[in-house]
Image: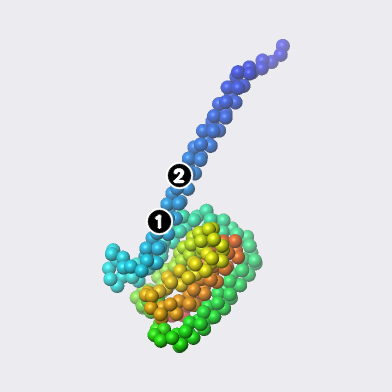
Amino acid sequence: MEPSRPSAESTTSTTSSTAAAEINGSTHNDGRSNVTDKITMTIKLLFIVAYAIVFLLPVDLPFVPEGSGLTLTMVAYPSMFILAVAGWHRELVAQVRQLVSGGLRSVGALAIGLIGANILVHLGTLISDWLAASLPNAGEQLTNDTNISSAIDAYPPWMIIGALAVVGPIVEEMFFRQFLLSAVAKHTRTWVGIVASSILFGMLHMSSFSLSEWVGIIPHTCFGIAFGILFAWMRKNVLFPSVVHVLNNLNGLVPSL
Protein backbone atom coordinates (compact mmCIF):
# COMPACT_ATOMS: atom_id res chain seq x y z
CA MET A 1 0.00 0.00 0.00
CA GLU A 2 1.54 3.32 -1.06
CA PRO A 3 1.76 6.19 1.48
CA SER A 4 -0.65 9.03 0.86
CA ARG A 5 0.82 12.07 -0.90
CA PRO A 6 -0.16 15.67 -0.29
CA SER A 7 -2.43 16.99 -2.97
CA ALA A 8 -1.27 19.71 -5.36
CA GLU A 9 -3.81 22.06 -3.85
CA SER A 10 -2.47 21.45 -0.32
CA THR A 11 1.13 22.02 -1.44
CA THR A 12 0.20 25.21 -3.27
CA SER A 13 -1.69 26.47 -0.22
CA THR A 14 1.24 25.78 2.12
CA THR A 15 3.71 27.46 -0.25
CA SER A 16 1.47 30.49 -0.58
CA SER A 17 1.12 30.77 3.19
CA THR A 18 4.88 30.58 3.68
CA ALA A 19 5.52 33.18 1.00
CA ALA A 20 2.90 35.47 2.49
CA ALA A 21 4.47 35.14 5.94
CA GLU A 22 7.91 35.96 4.54
CA ILE A 23 6.55 38.97 2.67
CA ASN A 24 4.72 40.20 5.76
CA GLY A 25 7.87 39.76 7.88
CA SER A 26 10.00 41.52 5.29
CA THR A 27 7.49 44.36 5.05
CA HIS A 28 7.44 44.67 8.82
CA ASN A 29 11.25 44.80 9.00
CA ASP A 30 11.40 47.31 6.16
CA GLY A 31 8.87 49.44 8.00
CA ARG A 32 10.92 49.43 11.18
CA SER A 33 14.08 50.18 9.18
CA ASN A 34 12.41 53.16 7.51
CA VAL A 35 11.31 54.54 10.87
CA THR A 36 14.83 54.11 12.28
CA ASP A 37 16.34 55.83 9.24
CA LYS A 38 13.96 58.77 9.62
CA ILE A 39 14.81 59.13 13.30
CA THR A 40 18.53 58.99 12.54
CA MET A 41 18.18 61.59 9.79
CA THR A 42 16.22 63.85 12.13
CA ILE A 43 18.94 63.60 14.79
CA LYS A 44 21.62 64.43 12.20
CA LEU A 45 19.64 67.46 11.03
CA LEU A 46 19.14 68.60 14.61
CA PHE A 47 22.88 68.35 15.26
CA ILE A 48 23.76 70.30 12.10
CA VAL A 49 21.23 73.08 12.77
CA ALA A 50 22.13 73.34 16.46
CA TYR A 51 25.85 73.55 15.74
CA ALA A 52 25.38 76.17 13.05
CA ILE A 53 23.15 78.32 15.29
CA VAL A 54 25.34 78.13 18.38
CA PHE A 55 28.81 78.35 16.84
CA LEU A 56 28.66 79.66 13.28
CA LEU A 57 25.97 82.32 12.98
CA PRO A 58 27.42 85.77 13.74
CA VAL A 59 24.44 86.82 15.87
CA ASP A 60 23.67 87.04 19.58
CA LEU A 61 21.25 84.34 20.63
CA PRO A 62 18.21 85.86 22.37
CA PHE A 63 17.96 83.03 24.91
CA VAL A 64 21.59 83.40 26.07
CA PRO A 65 22.24 86.10 28.71
CA GLU A 66 25.01 88.54 27.94
CA GLY A 67 28.37 87.28 29.11
CA SER A 68 27.24 83.63 29.19
CA GLY A 69 28.98 82.53 26.01
CA LEU A 70 31.50 80.36 27.84
CA THR A 71 28.77 78.61 29.78
CA LEU A 72 26.87 77.96 26.56
CA THR A 73 29.97 76.42 25.00
CA MET A 74 30.62 74.16 27.99
CA VAL A 75 27.02 72.92 27.88
CA ALA A 76 26.63 72.77 24.10
CA TYR A 77 29.61 70.54 23.40
CA PRO A 78 28.46 67.56 25.50
CA SER A 79 24.88 67.92 24.22
CA MET A 80 25.99 67.98 20.60
CA PHE A 81 28.36 65.08 21.20
CA ILE A 82 25.38 62.95 22.19
CA LEU A 83 23.46 64.04 19.08
CA ALA A 84 26.44 63.31 16.82
CA VAL A 85 26.99 59.84 18.22
CA ALA A 86 23.27 59.04 17.98
CA GLY A 87 23.01 60.35 14.43
CA TRP A 88 26.13 58.70 13.01
CA HIS A 89 26.25 55.62 15.25
CA ARG A 90 26.34 53.16 12.35
CA GLU A 91 29.19 54.97 10.63
CA LEU A 92 31.10 55.36 13.88
CA VAL A 93 30.85 51.66 14.72
CA ALA A 94 32.28 50.77 11.30
CA GLN A 95 35.00 53.39 11.70
CA VAL A 96 36.02 52.06 15.12
CA ARG A 97 36.37 48.60 13.59
CA GLN A 98 38.48 50.03 10.76
CA LEU A 99 40.76 51.90 13.16
CA VAL A 100 41.22 48.93 15.50
CA SER A 101 41.68 46.34 12.75
CA GLY A 102 44.25 48.58 11.08
CA GLY A 103 46.71 47.94 13.88
CA LEU A 104 50.13 49.45 13.16
CA ARG A 105 48.82 51.02 9.97
CA SER A 106 46.33 53.03 12.01
CA VAL A 107 49.04 54.06 14.46
CA GLY A 108 51.27 55.10 11.59
CA ALA A 109 48.47 57.11 9.98
CA LEU A 110 47.80 58.91 13.26
CA ALA A 111 51.50 59.68 13.66
CA ILE A 112 51.75 61.01 10.11
CA GLY A 113 48.57 63.03 10.64
CA LEU A 114 49.91 64.55 13.85
CA ILE A 115 53.27 65.43 12.29
CA GLY A 116 51.64 66.81 9.15
CA ALA A 117 49.20 68.90 11.16
CA ASN A 118 51.99 70.46 13.19
CA ILE A 119 54.01 71.22 10.05
CA LEU A 120 51.04 72.95 8.41
CA VAL A 121 50.21 74.88 11.58
CA HIS A 122 53.82 76.00 11.90
CA LEU A 123 53.70 77.22 8.31
CA GLY A 124 50.39 78.97 8.98
CA THR A 125 51.83 80.61 12.10
CA LEU A 126 54.79 81.94 10.13
CA ILE A 127 52.44 83.46 7.55
CA SER A 128 50.16 84.86 10.25
CA ASP A 129 53.06 86.42 12.17
CA TRP A 130 54.48 87.95 8.99
CA LEU A 131 51.12 89.49 8.05
CA ALA A 132 50.57 90.72 11.61
CA ALA A 133 53.92 92.52 11.49
CA SER A 134 53.39 93.87 7.98
CA LEU A 135 49.78 95.06 8.05
CA PRO A 136 48.37 97.83 10.24
CA ASN A 137 46.03 96.75 13.06
CA ALA A 138 46.62 93.09 12.27
CA GLY A 139 48.69 92.12 15.29
CA GLU A 140 46.00 91.87 17.96
CA GLN A 141 45.56 88.54 19.74
CA LEU A 142 42.81 86.32 18.44
CA THR A 143 39.75 86.77 20.66
CA ASN A 144 39.21 83.02 20.70
CA ASP A 145 42.54 82.58 22.51
CA THR A 146 41.49 85.16 25.10
CA ASN A 147 38.20 83.33 25.63
CA ILE A 148 40.04 80.07 26.24
CA SER A 149 42.20 81.77 28.86
CA SER A 150 39.02 83.05 30.54
CA ALA A 151 37.52 79.56 30.49
CA ILE A 152 40.62 78.10 32.14
CA ASP A 153 40.25 80.64 34.94
CA ALA A 154 36.49 80.11 35.30
CA TYR A 155 36.10 76.32 35.26
CA PRO A 156 37.79 73.36 37.01
CA PRO A 157 40.46 71.46 35.06
CA TRP A 158 38.32 68.36 34.56
CA MET A 159 35.64 70.42 32.79
CA ILE A 160 38.20 72.14 30.59
CA ILE A 161 39.77 68.84 29.58
CA GLY A 162 36.42 67.13 29.05
CA ALA A 163 34.66 69.88 27.11
CA LEU A 164 37.44 71.73 25.29
CA ALA A 165 40.14 69.09 24.89
CA VAL A 166 38.13 65.92 24.23
CA VAL A 167 34.43 66.39 23.49
CA GLY A 168 34.77 69.73 21.66
CA PRO A 169 37.28 68.50 19.05
CA ILE A 170 35.20 65.41 18.33
CA VAL A 171 32.07 67.52 17.84
CA GLU A 172 33.95 69.87 15.53
CA GLU A 173 35.27 66.96 13.46
CA MET A 174 31.78 65.49 13.19
CA PHE A 175 30.48 68.77 11.79
CA PHE A 176 33.34 69.96 9.61
CA ARG A 177 34.68 66.65 8.32
CA GLN A 178 31.99 63.99 8.72
CA PHE A 179 29.18 66.27 7.57
CA LEU A 180 30.44 69.38 5.75
CA LEU A 181 33.48 68.03 3.90
CA SER A 182 31.57 64.92 2.83
CA ALA A 183 28.57 66.95 1.67
CA VAL A 184 30.64 69.39 -0.39
CA ALA A 185 32.85 66.63 -1.84
CA LYS A 186 29.77 64.64 -2.86
CA HIS A 187 28.65 67.42 -5.21
CA THR A 188 32.08 68.74 -6.27
CA ARG A 189 35.54 67.29 -5.60
CA THR A 190 37.29 66.13 -2.45
CA TRP A 191 39.83 68.96 -2.48
CA VAL A 192 36.99 71.50 -2.70
CA GLY A 193 35.42 69.94 0.38
CA ILE A 194 38.75 70.06 2.21
CA VAL A 195 39.32 73.75 1.40
CA ALA A 196 35.73 74.85 2.09
CA SER A 197 35.47 73.00 5.40
CA SER A 198 38.91 74.25 6.48
CA ILE A 199 38.07 77.90 5.81
CA LEU A 200 34.84 77.60 7.78
CA PHE A 201 36.71 75.77 10.52
CA GLY A 202 39.12 78.68 10.73
CA MET A 203 36.24 81.17 10.78
CA LEU A 204 34.76 79.27 13.71
CA HIS A 205 37.54 80.83 15.80
CA MET A 206 36.65 84.38 14.78
CA SER A 207 34.63 86.76 16.95
CA SER A 208 34.50 89.56 14.35
CA PHE A 209 35.49 90.28 10.76
CA SER A 210 38.38 92.57 11.67
CA LEU A 211 41.70 92.22 9.88
CA SER A 212 43.44 90.90 12.98
CA GLU A 213 40.89 88.09 13.29
CA TRP A 214 41.35 87.07 9.64
CA VAL A 215 45.11 87.01 10.12
CA GLY A 216 44.81 85.16 13.42
CA ILE A 217 42.77 82.25 12.05
CA ILE A 218 45.35 81.26 9.41
CA PRO A 219 46.95 78.59 11.67
CA HIS A 220 43.49 77.21 12.51
CA THR A 221 42.65 77.01 8.82
CA CYS A 222 45.90 75.12 8.22
CA PHE A 223 44.89 72.72 10.97
CA GLY A 224 41.58 72.20 9.19
CA ILE A 225 43.39 71.40 5.94
CA ALA A 226 45.52 68.79 7.74
CA PHE A 227 42.43 67.21 9.32
CA GLY A 228 40.64 67.20 5.97
CA ILE A 229 43.53 65.52 4.17
CA LEU A 230 43.78 62.86 6.90
CA PHE A 231 40.02 62.30 6.75
CA ALA A 232 40.06 61.80 2.99
CA TRP A 233 43.22 59.65 3.09
CA MET A 234 41.73 57.29 5.67
CA ARG A 235 38.62 56.65 3.58
CA LYS A 236 36.50 59.27 5.33
CA ASN A 237 37.06 57.85 8.80
CA VAL A 238 36.45 60.78 11.15
CA LEU A 239 38.12 59.03 14.08
CA PHE A 240 41.59 59.71 12.67
CA PRO A 241 41.32 63.53 12.54
CA SER A 242 39.37 63.42 15.81
CA VAL A 243 42.23 61.67 17.63
CA VAL A 244 44.80 64.10 16.21
CA HIS A 245 42.55 67.06 17.10
CA VAL A 246 42.11 65.80 20.68
CA LEU A 247 45.85 65.24 21.11
CA ASN A 248 46.56 68.75 19.83
CA ASN A 249 44.07 70.34 22.23
CA LEU A 250 45.36 68.31 25.16
CA ASN A 251 48.89 69.45 24.36
CA GLY A 252 47.76 73.07 24.26
CA LEU A 253 45.46 73.08 27.30
CA VAL A 254 46.94 70.72 29.89
CA PRO A 255 50.15 72.77 30.50
CA SER A 256 47.97 75.84 31.18
CA LEU A 257 45.82 74.17 33.84
Q: Which mark is residue 35?
A: 2
Quadrant where the C terminus sits is bottom left
Residue 156: tell me if it is visible.
yes
Colouring rule applied to residues: rainbow
Q: Position of 95 compared to 170: left or right?
A: right
- Residue identifier under label 1: 46
Q: Position of 45 compared to 94: left or right?
A: left
- Disc on the earlier residue, 2 or 1: 2
Quadrant in the rendering for residue 8: top right
Tag 2: amino acid: Val
Q: Is residue 238 above or below residue 148?
A: above
Of 177 and 132, nearer the camera is 132
| Residue located 47% across and 84% down the image | 131
Quadrant in the rendering for residue 119: bottom right
Alpha carbon of mark 2 to alpha carbon of mark 1: how far?
A: 17 Å
Q: Position of residue 64 (x, y in %)?
A: 29, 66
| Residue located 41% across and 86% down the image | 136
Quadrant where the N terminus sits is top right
Q: Position of residue 88 (x, y in %)?
A: 49, 56
Q: Residues within 10 Å of mark 2 (few under 14, many from 20)?
A: few
Q: Residues within 10 Å of mark 1 (few under 14, many from 20)?
A: some
